[in-house]
Amino acid sequence: MMKRIFVAAIVATFAAGSALAQETCESKAVGKDGKPLAGAAKTSFLKKCKEDACAPKAVSADGKPLAGAAKNSFMKKCETSA
């Protein structure tokens, strides 16, 4: 019984830690004054943030950067999920 509780506590700790560590583009969308961005500034920031987050992941199985239609498809899919 004690082992089960201990294992559950360890799993919960790691799950909570990884959830808190993930910082989304939405949470980074703040201005220099510390206030949340709004309107066109927010839209522009979110678009650039998502592109920057997905670009390094756009590589093929052999490690080469994707290009053309494959890159466009990957970036579209990545940006909608990010």
Image (tube, rainbow, N blue to C red):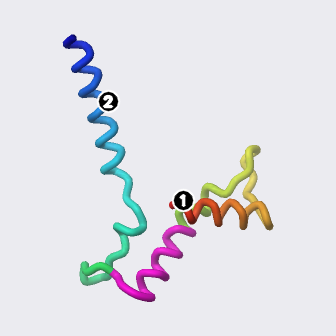
Residue situated furthest bottom in the rendering:
40
> Residue at left 79%, top 65%?
69
List the residue tagged with mark 1: 81
Main secondary structure of the magenta stretch: helix
State the SS at label 2.
helix
Residue situated furthest right in the rendering:
68
Quick check: is 45 in the magenta stretch? yes
Q: Is residue 21 left or right of residue 60?
A: left
Query: Mark 2 or mark 1: which comes first in sequence?
Result: 2
> Residue at left 74%, top 45%?
61
> Residue at left 53%, top 62%?
53
Could you tell me residue 45's position as x and y percent?
46, 78
Magenta residue span: 37-51
List the residue tagged with mark 2: 11
Quick check: is 36 in the magenta stretch? no
- The amino acid type, in three-letter code, at marker 1 is Ser
Could you tell me residue 12's position as x and y percent?
28, 33
